[in-house]
Amino acid sequence: MAAGFVRGDEESFALVYRRWGTLVHSLAARSLGDAREAEDVAQQTFLAAWRGRHGYHALRGPLPGWLVGIARRKIADAHAARSRRTELAAAHAARGSADTPGTAEPPEAALDRVLVSQELRKLPPVQRDILRLAFYDDLTHVQIAERTGLPLGTVKSHARRAMARIRRSMTDGFAADGFTADSSAA
């Protein structure tokens, strides 16, 4: 089966997919927490395997191990894409009201703004206020400490914890909302 796959035999490829597609999908679903995104990663994995099939050598290890290696890279790409989307959403939220009225924005920008707003509402009031002052009012940590009367270290800790919480929540939420990763084939 592996030899036929490497030669480019489509029937062998179909057999490889039927035999190990569930394994790849399960790995992706467990890591990403979303069945649809896992399907995308499984597709990307097998597409990359097909395109790079000449790089497989049986002497280096079994075909399923090679496929799992490709799947792990595609899963890592999906996680990286989530992080990029989270950072972009936070950056867009930081610009917030700086957008000029009447300017057409891509639908993704509006969605990002809504997602960040939802995540801000989930934060404890102190953390939410600190992030709003930092991103929407463009205040430094020192300025926030002066305005709120909180110690500087407390302001920094709240900001760091709030950003980490938003990052975790949005990373998990993107999978649940059906977003897919942007990654290239290997």
Image: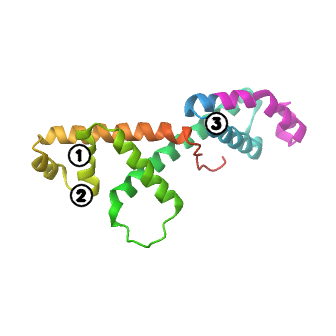
7 or 169, nearer to the observer = 169
Q: Do the residues labelled 1 and 2 touch (CB within 8 Å)?
A: no
Can you identify the residue that label 3 sits on?
A: 38
Q: How far apart are marks 1 and 3 (CA)?
A: 36 Å
152 or 148, nearer to the observer = 148
Q: Is mark 1 on a helix, strand or loop?
A: helix
Which residue shows up at 55% across the image and 42% down it? 177
Name the amino acid, label 1. Answer: Ile
Q: Which of marks 1 and 3 is in front?
A: 1
Q: How far apart are marks 3 and 2 (CA)?
A: 39 Å
- Highlighted range, magenta: 1-26
Quick one: label 3, few (<14), some, or many (20+) residues within 10 Å? many
160 or 14, nearer to the observer = 160
Q: Where is residue 66 in the image (x, y as percent from the top left)?
A: 69, 32
Determine the image quadrant of residue 88: bottom left
* Marker disc for residue 130: 1
Name the amino acid, label 3. Answer: Ala
Q: Is residue 59 visible?
A: no
Q: What element carries label 2?
A: loop
The disc, 3 or 2, on the residue closer to the chain's N-terminal end is: 3
Can you identify the residue that label 2 sits on?
A: 137
Q: Nearer the viewer, mark 3 or mark 2?
A: 2
Determine the image quadrant of residue 137: bottom left
Name the amino acid, label 2. Answer: Asp
Which residue shows up at 49% across the image and 36% down it? 172
Query: Residue 61 vs residue 145: left or right?
Result: right
Q: Distance between the residues labelled 1 and 2?
A: 10 Å
Query: Residue 81 vs residue 141: left or right?
Result: right
Which residue shows up at 44% across the image and 51% down it? 114
